[in-house]
Amino acid sequence: MRNTTFLCFSILGLALNAFAQAATSCKLPINLDRLAAKAAEVVDVDMDANMLQFAGKFLNGEKSDEAQARKLISSLKGLCVRSFEFDSDGQYGAEDVEAIRAQFQSPTWSRMVGVRSKRDRENVDVFFRMEKGSVTGLAVIAAEPKELTFVHIDGVIDPQQLNELGGQFGIPKVEMPAKPSGKAETK
């Protein structure tokens, strides 16, 4: 069973890599090649709607998290992930992060979350694009001293299903806190 699972994920990885190299769904005016040239490790995922549908076929509809991810990607137009890991601090600057942030300005985009941690030296921004009451785009910029990650999802997104994309297609897994039940615990 493990060998079959490993083989399936290997084939999926090769297929996604081949498709990602040919894709053009990430249309940022900013050129990130300069960051890639400095990085020790680069993740570059670029998928249009057709590739997402193809990749979705490899997700197991019997596993709840994969079934939810499969349902979510069925309405997406594109997915773009860029992640750069550097050997040392200072290999990218605030101007690099600001150039990416500048792509997500109002009135089309709204920054919904901004996290700044002086202790951990980590910054995260989450932007949403809203059209007619629906979320139609999401962008996440996560900056750490030695890592810079950018995720852009284009298409109608159900916020309840969004967490299920974590761990899929190069998107980092983010653990969401459990919803309070509203009932007081008794011991």
Image (cartoon, helix red, strand yellow):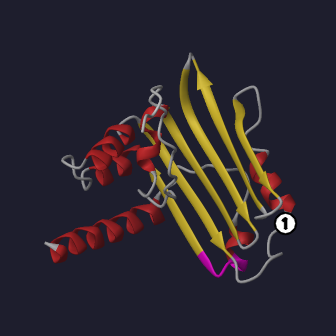
Q: Nearer the viewer, residue 25 or 110?
A: 110
Q: Quadrant of the N terminus?
A: bottom left
Residue 16: give x, y in percent of width and height.
38, 63
Residue at image location 52% in from the left, 53% down from the top: 174
Residue 80: give x, y in percent of width and height.
54, 53
Query: Extreme left residue here?
Result: 1
For residue 166, say whether it is visible. yes
For residue 48, say whether it is visible. no
Residue 50: give x, y in percent of width and height.
36, 46
Q: Is residue 57 above or below residue 134?
A: below
Is 104 within the magenta?
no
Q: Secondary structure at mark 1?
A: loop
Range of the magenta residues? Answer: 37-41
Q: Nearer the viewer, residue 184 or 50?
A: 184
Q: Is residue 35 above or below residue 99?
A: below
Task: Describe residue 134's horizontal placement relative to residue 56 as left or right.
Answer: right
How many numbered callouts?
Answer: 1
Residue at image location 48% in from the left, 45% down from the top: 78
Read off the residue under disc 1: 93
Quarter of image, res 3: bottom left
Is 39 within the magenta?
yes
Residue density around tag 1, few if under 14, some if 14–19, many if 20 or more, within 10 Å: few
Which amino acid lies under the numbered mark 1 shown in the image of this protein? Gly
